[in-house]
Amino acid sequence: ETGVTQTPRHLVMGMTNKKSLKCEQHLGHNAMYWYKQSAKKPLELMFVYNFKEQTENNSVPSRFSPECPNSSHLFLHLHTLQPEDSALYLCASSQARGGQETQYFGPGTRLLVL
Amino acid sequence: GQNIDQPTEMTATEGAIVQINCTYQTSGFNGLFWYQQHAGEAPTFLSYNVLDGLEEKGRFSSFLSRSKGYSYLLLKELQMKDSASYLCAAMDSNYQLIWGAGTKLIIKP
């Protein structure tokens, strides 16, 4: 496996379900990100982990809960979601060094909340 | 506040040249990124500019003017596979990316 991988690629869940999204990066990076992408809107940064420590939250609702067990893996735990949470959830990684920090993205998880 | 503006949609002809503009307002500035995103796929990195001027990379070039808060992506010899969304993102003083909504580029034969 190379680059950034995400599973599952597609997910349909009811508002009372609990599910988790998984991201893994094989680039040796030290920072990982969760973004939400809705149609015709800018990417919304949800969470940032730098050296496994969460550094940004951006006022994300508590029904989204991130977990970063190590610098290669990132999870997004979902519970009691709302239909407006339906979107593409993208994971990215970068080598944080205070300069050009190019982010590399996974293919995303397309989430539909019914 | 911080803001990125780029056109919602553009149409161009195969073999032609197209310029996608982006203006930005950020708290501090640490560079301007362009990404390409095909429908249903991940955004992929195209270019990074932090100094004024033009950076050329094959058929794609990117330009930056820091004093004007302006960048453009220039695509030459357009191919059908260039049909995609092009995302402009500026990095602020905290090294956070501020994203535009993307420009959907439609290439016609």
Image (cartoon, rainbow, N blue to C red):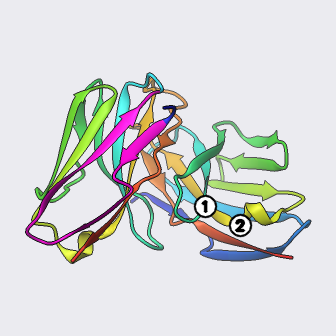
Residue B17 belongs to magenta span: no
Q: Is disc 2 surrounded by few (<14), some (14 to 19) or many (20+) residues within 10 Å?
A: many
What's the residue at 63%, 72% (across, down)? B7
Task: Please tell me in which quadrant of the rendered image residue A12 appears.
Answer: bottom left
Amino acid type at circle 1 is His
Front residue (pair A18, A34): A18
Q: Relative to residue B92, is residue B24 depicted above or below? A: below
Q: Image height check: is B32 above or below A44?
A: above
A75 left or right of A95? Answer: left
Magenta-highlighted stretch: main secondary structure? strand
Horizontally, is A90 left or right of B55 in the view?
left
Q: Is residue A79 visible?
A: yes
Q: Name the quadrant containing residue A24.
A: top left
Residue A49, percent from left and from top: 28, 34
Task: Identify the residue at horizontal 39%, vertical 56% (top origin).
Answer: A9
Tag 2–tag 1 contact (CB < 8 Å): yes
Q: Is residue B29 left or right of residue B66?
A: left
* Residue A77 placement, left or right of B97: left
How many numbered discs sit on the rendered protein? 2
Where is residue B10 shown, x and y percent of the image? 71, 75
Spatial CA span between label 2 and label 1: 7 Å
Residue B83 is marked as 2
Where are the magenta residues, as a range?
A4-26
Which chain hosts label 1? Answer: B
Say what amino acid the circle numbered 2 marks.
Answer: Ser
**Label 1: which residue?**
B38
Q: What number is the disc on residue B1?
A: none
